[in-house]
Image: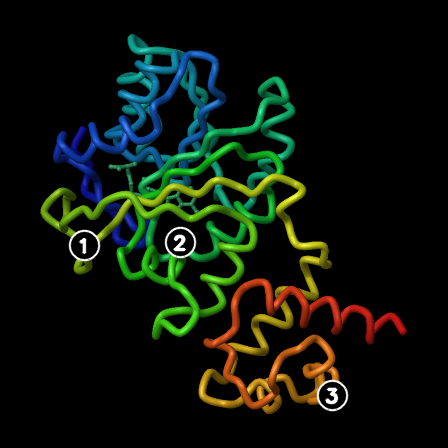
Amino acid sequence: MSARPKKSFGQHFLHDTRYIDDIVRAIAPKADDTLVEIGPGEGALTLPLLAAAGTLTAIELDTDLIPALMARAAPVGLLTLLQADVLKVDFGALARERGGAPLRIAGNLPYYISSPILFHCIAHATAIRDMHFMLQKEVVDRMAAAPGSKVYGRLSVMLQLACHVVPLFEVPPAAFRPPPKVDSAVVRLVPRAAHELPAVDAEMLQQLVKAAFGQRRKTLGNALRGVLDATAIRTVGIDPQARAEALAPADFVRLAQQYAALRTA
Ligand code: SAM
């Protein structure tokens, strides 16, 4: 049970039991939870989660890890291992297959695709009750950043509009084998209730936020050239001379609503 970790799969296995315990305590799994783990690896989180919940579905890309993990899990509980790329897993369909309750997703994520995984999860947010992820600390800082911060950007706006973002604690490189080059942190994401979600087309919002932060140092008027003109920006009470990093997430919603209205006019 100590295969050589594969760099190409972002494998950094947790071995420090203090942090493993802290993560499991933060998740607080219950027997009737529908738990899903992304990237179980050698099972550092899988086994304690399985022990607490009795059943768990894990999604692992690396076929080499699967037989040993199944063998270790067998005496602990009912582990369903899906050999798949998590980015191809339809969480809505998975929740329906598992009885319909929203999923509780957890994982020490492969850092090389952490942002695509986050965007994939928020696209399926209605099927998810909560998420607990280990990520690069720098990514957690960006997810939780407030307007005006140097690290506030597309990830902050899109994540905060979809979820409550709660940074929990930091984890040093020495907690992993092999140690990553960066500090890590655990974050909790709780998808917003339907009434808290922005009334705007998700695709339009994506496009607008991407354009606004595409050229951070430009004013909004310049960054959104070809998307929204200065008059349209002013119509929703926003100064076209402002920069994207000064705008609150709700401001982007108003801009995207205006963009959608003009596109369909
Ligand atoms: N959970 C284990 C732990 O904490 O020790 C392993 C975490 S390791 C950082 C990331 C895990 O994600 C690895 O097991 C890796 O093989 C798996 N992985 C990498 N890319 C993946 C993908 N696209 N879909 C599913 N799992 C993936």
* Residue count near mark 1 (Cα–Cα under 10 Å), binned few <14, some 14–19, many ≥20: some
Q: Residue extending furthest right?
A: 265
Tag 3: amino acid: Thr
Which residue occupies 63% across, 84% down? 224
Tell me which corner region of the image, top left, top right, bottom left or bottom right, holds residue 47: top left
> Which one is in front, 11 or 221?
221
Which residue has dot 3 on it? 231
* Residue count near mark 3 (Cα–Cα under 10 Å), binned few <14, some 14–19, many ≥20: few
Which residue occupies 82% across, 75% down? 262
Label 1 vs 3, first from the N-terminus: 1
Q: Residue extending furthest front?
A: 237
- Mark 2 falls on what kind of element? helix
In this rendering, the label closer to the viewer, 1 or 3 = 3
Tell me which corner region of the image, top left, top right, bottom left or bottom right, holds residue 78: top left
Tag 1: amino acid: Pro
Spatial CA distance of label 2 from label 3 is 37 Å
Which residue occupies 21% across, 40% down? 13
Label 2 vs 1, first from the N-terminus: 2
Tag 2: amino acid: Ser
User: Ligand 1 shows up in which quadrant of the image?
Assistant: top left
Q: Position of residue 169 (x, y in %)?
A: 23, 44
208 on left or right of 23? right
What colouring style does the render use? rainbow
Q: Is residue 215 above or below residue 29?
A: below
- Residues at circles 2 and 3 in contact by the CB criterion of under 8 Å: no
Q: Residue extending furthest left?
A: 174
Spatial CA distance of label 1 from label 3 is 48 Å
Q: Position of residue 144 (x, y in %)?
A: 38, 57
Q: Which mark is residue 180?
A: 1
